[in-house]
Image: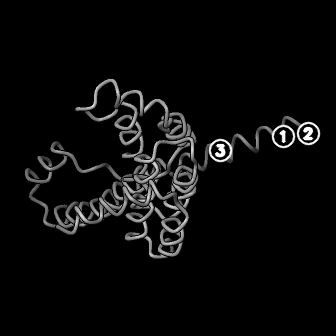
Amino acid sequence: MRNKINTFIGLVIAVVLGFFLMNREEPITKSTEAKINNSNSPSFERKVASTSEEVEPQMMTARVYEQDKQEKNLSTITKAEIKSIRDSLPNKQMVKKELNDNPHTPSKTLMSFAKQLGPAMEKAFKNKTDAQTLTRELKDCAVNNSIADAARALCVQDVEKLSGYHPDLKTQARELRSEVSTGVLKILETSDAFIRK
């Protein structure tokens, strides 16, 4: 009985494979086009022309699907990116020390933090889910007293930038600005005045 079942399954597989192989059309290549050009049969030329018209849209659809799939994969903020942002949060004491040691250059810690935020912000501009994920992180940053005021101000500004792309974040951006400390608010107001000029 088992041998009959195995034979039947093998036969079904062979029939299905045979069907697909028989119905498969030869792809249009330069060698196929050369055969077409050398052929004197008008019906043969019409058949090949219609085949090429069918193949091109299918290939384009496949390419667009693959490109769309790749863009979706690239547009998701990963847990590793969130961890990198959290790990790069500028400690208030570290930034103060860097500025005291070298008052004429920007803090390396602040610059590193801004660099970590960049790729995540790009993704968040394009994707609402990523914007919500990043906004949670930025809000935590903005209200954390152990983080340097300049970094906290940057976090508020980034939430405000995201709200420009995702209007449902506008209320959160307004509320966040009203929750920050006086030091952070002064930085924000100075920045706002500079931007208006």
Res 23 seen here: no
Which amino acid, by three-letter code, is at mark 1? Lys
Alpha-carbon span between mark 2 and mark 3: 19 Å
Above or below — where is 131 with respect to 2? below
Q: Are marks 1 and 2 in contact (CB under 8 Å)?
A: yes
Where does label 1 land, which residue? 4
Comes first in the chain, label 3 or label 1: 1
Residue 147, x across and y down, in percent: 52, 42
Q: Which residue is the extreme one toward the right?
A: 1
Tell me what residue is drawn at x 53 percent, y 34 percent.
87
Residue 92, x across and y down, in percent: 49, 37
Q: Are marks 2 and 3 in contact (CB under 8 Å)?
A: no
Neighbour tally class for label 3: few under 14, some 14-19, many 20 plus, Cα within 10 Å:
few
Residue 67, x across and y down, in percent: 36, 53
Q: Which of marks 3 and 1 is in front?
A: 3
Res 184 seen here: yes
Residue 59, x across and y down, in percent: 32, 56
Q: Name the mark on residue 13.
A: 3
Position of 160 with respect to 85 (left or right) is left
Q: Name the mark on residue 1.
A: 2
Q: Which residue is the extreme one toward the top?
A: 101
Neighbour tally class for label 1: few under 14, some 14-19, many 20 plus, Cα within 10 Å:
few
Which amino acid, by three-letter code, is at mark 2? Met
Alpha-carbon span between mark 3 and mark 1: 14 Å
Q: Name the mark on residue 70.
A: none
**Image quarter hosting the N terminus:** top right
Question: SS class of the residue under badge 3?
Answer: helix
Quarter location, residue 80: top right
Tell me what residue is drawn at x 76 percent, y 44 percent.
8
